[in-house]
Image (cartoon, coloured by chain):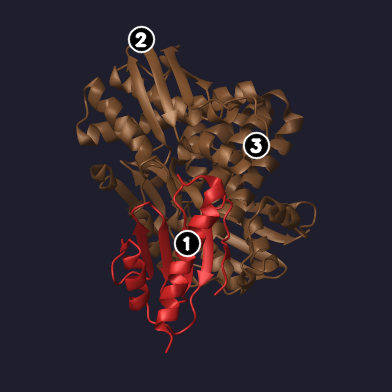
Chain colours: A red, B brown
């Protein structure tokens, strides 16, 4: 899984990764929930949105596995990348947990 | 503010949107900043700020009056509270208005223009004049309505602004000179200046996506800052009468005083349409929200063009259709847009085409459809914009039909120059 800035002009707020194709989302959501993320979208939504207490958000496009990590705007700019990387590591751990 | 959501209406066959009968659209901060800059470039900063503040005051007064009447807000406290809440709900930031019938002060934080200017340009650009004329006009309109004062009787000046490196934004409101109210340009006026709706290429796809986008936007409102961050940009629900009044007042002023410069200003306003499509439409096309709803852009020109027409409709720009496309020519037709109805209602017929945003948007759609490698996840940076649009475009855009000139519809043709 790659980790990079997403297409966005806002300073270090949006980051992108892509889930490996064909994976189940439910265990990944469980992993994010353990990391204090709560789903804010409905189960049927094509875009799964989870929000942490600190305000960070993870958006997962169901049909493609694209993930956008949105760091909360109050996070100081020098710390935004680290905050996004921490969420990325949670995602990777969740994905690794799905591997056979 | 949930009650305001219920005041939205849609002239469905024309893809025009209204709030309490007042036309509104969605535009992002890239467009909003560029739009205001073009007004200042055309008129100079002092007159530009005056024109922008007056247009904001006119448009905001129309909106606040309509909403206050429908929600039963009557006292000064009720109307000021409504104005503050509405301002934030629309994504313009947080505005605290502390006034009486003789004026007072307003303070802003996270104001859309000033804050997003700082986010976009930050330390790279030094600016000498404040950015929040829309907030100034809005505060003045709220004060007038709160104390039942005639239009123009309150004047607002931004004295501190984030873009001037102040800690926040502050406005002084003081008595102004009452003026005659400009002619209302509301839903009824718009409805009287549109053509019967028609379809075009990819009609079913465009229509379905536009419906989906409108559905998404119904859930969009300002966050705790009063900002809307979506599609990787700051979005505002904005009054199209503000955009139209500022553009037409600026171009009329130049036509009257410096006719040789008017065509330069018109090209700037066309470029505002380009900036809108490149940034707003482009960021929407690349957003996870769009990918979830529609799918990632395929790179097929028709996929991009259909997406752009759907976005225009979904944002309330009017009923834009794809009439013809080849790599050499693009023809867009519209039974409605937000420019011509305003022009006709406020000024009457024109002797030339006046839909500058529609013109610039068409040219940009041609460029996005044929020059951008969408599947390679392009970054929509200023550098990329310059590489696409400055000096290398083989096409010219002409508005071949315009309702302001007496034609039945709006039509723009982008063809090899």
**Labels 1 and 3 in the same subunit:** no
Q: Name the residue under label 3.
A: B123
Answer few, some or many: residues within 10 Å of disc 1's Cα (few below 14, many 20 plus, some between 14 and 19). few
* SS label for mark 1: helix
Does B411 sit left or right of B257 as displayed? Answer: left
Q: In this view, does B345 lie above or below B15?
A: above
Residue B270 or residue B26, whichever sits in front: B26
Name the chain letter of the residue that bears numbered label 2: B
Q: Are marks 2 and 3 in contact (CB under 8 Å)?
A: no
Q: Which chain carries label 3?
A: B
Give the quarter of the figure containing the C terminus of chain B. bottom right
Where, by quadrant of the figure, is residue B4 drawn?
Answer: top left
Place of residue B380 in the rendered image (x, y in percent of width and height, measured from the top left): 63, 57
The CA span between labels 1 and 3 is 28 Å
| Residue in front for this viewpoint, A57 or B352 | A57
Q: Is residue B409 visible?
A: no
Same chain, labels 2 and 3: yes
Q: Distance between the residues labelled 2 and 3?
A: 38 Å
Residue B69 x %, y %: 24, 32
Horizontal arrangement in the rendering, residue B294 relative to residue B405 (left or right): left
Say which of A99 and A67 sits in front. A99
In the rendered image, residue B372, in percent from the top left (x then y), is placed at 67, 66
Quickly name the residue at label 1. Answer: A86
Question: Extreme left residue here?
Answer: B72
Q: How far apart are marks 1 and 2 (CA)?
A: 53 Å
The residue at which mark 2 appears reads as B102
Q: What element carries label 3?
A: helix
Of badges 2 and 3, the one in the foreground is 3
**Residue pictured at 55% horizontal, 58% vertical:** B283
Outermost residue to the bottom:
A100
Task: Say yes or no: labels 1 and 2 on the same chain.
Answer: no
- Numbered marks: total: 3
């Amino acid at each position: 899984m790659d980790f990079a800035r997403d297409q966005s002009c806002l300073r270090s707020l949006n980051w992108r990764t892509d889930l490996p194709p064909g994976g189940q989302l439910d265990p990944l959501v469980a992993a994010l929930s353990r990391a204090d993320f709560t789903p804010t979208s409905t189960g049927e939504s094509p875009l799964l949105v989870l929000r942490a207490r600190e305000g960070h958000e993870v958006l997962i496009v169901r049909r493609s596995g694209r993930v956008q990590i949105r760091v909360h705007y109050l996070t100081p700019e020098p710390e935004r990348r680290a905050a996004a990387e921490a969420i990325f590591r949670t995602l990777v751990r969740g994905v690794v947990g799905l591997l056979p | 503010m949930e009650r305001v959501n219920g005041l939205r209406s849609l002239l469905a066959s024309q893809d025009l949107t209204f709030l309490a009968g007042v036309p509104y659209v969605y535009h992002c901060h890239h467009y909003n900043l560029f739009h205001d800059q073009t007004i200042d470039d055309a008129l100079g900063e002092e007159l530009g700020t005056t024109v922008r503040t007056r247009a904001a005051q006119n448009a905001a007064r129309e909106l606040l009056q309509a909403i206050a009447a429908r929600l039963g807000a009557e006292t000064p406290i009720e109307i000021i509270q409504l104005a503050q809440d509405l301002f934030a709900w629309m994504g313009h930031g947080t505005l605290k208005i502390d006034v009486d019938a003789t004026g007072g002060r307003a303070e802003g934080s996270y104001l859309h223009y000033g804050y997003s200017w700082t986010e976009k340009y930050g330390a790279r650009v030094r600016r000498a004049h404040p950015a929040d004329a829309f907030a100034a006009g809005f505060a003045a309109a709220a004060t007038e309505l709160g104390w039942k004062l005639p239009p123009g009787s309150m004047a607002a000046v931004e004295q501190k602004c984030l873009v001037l490196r102040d800690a926040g934004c502050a406005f002084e409101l003081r008595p102004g000179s009452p003026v005659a109210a400009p002619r209302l340009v509301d839903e009824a006026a718009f409805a009287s200046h549109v053509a019967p709706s028609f379809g075009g290429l990819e009609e079913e796809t465009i229509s379905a996506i536009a419906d989906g986008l409108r559905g998404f936007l119904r859930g969009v409102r300002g966050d705790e800052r009063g900002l809307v961050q979506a599609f990787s940009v700051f979005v505002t629900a904005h009054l199209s009468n503000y955009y139209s009044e500022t553009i037409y007042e600026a171009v009329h002023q130049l036509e009257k005083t410096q006719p040789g410069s008017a065509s330069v200003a018109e090209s700037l306003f066309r470029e505002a349409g380009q900036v809108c499509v490149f940034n707003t439409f482009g960021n929407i096309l690349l957003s996870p929200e769009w990918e979830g709803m529609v799918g990632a852009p395929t790179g097929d020109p028709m996929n991009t063009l259909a997406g752009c027409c759907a976005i225009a409709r979904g944002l309330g720009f009017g009923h834009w259709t794809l009439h013809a496309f080849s790599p050499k020519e693009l023809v867009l037709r519209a039974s409605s847009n937000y420019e011509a109805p305003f022009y006709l209602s406020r000024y009457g017929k024109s002797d030339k085409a006046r839909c500058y945003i529609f013109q610039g948007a068409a040219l940009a759609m041609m460029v996005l459809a044929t020059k951008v490698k969408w599947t390679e996840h392009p970054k929509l940076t200023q550098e990329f914009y310059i590489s696409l649009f400055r000096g290398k475009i083989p096409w010219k855009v002409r508005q071949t039909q315009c309702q302001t000139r007496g034609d039945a519809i709006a039509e723009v043709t982008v063809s090899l120059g």
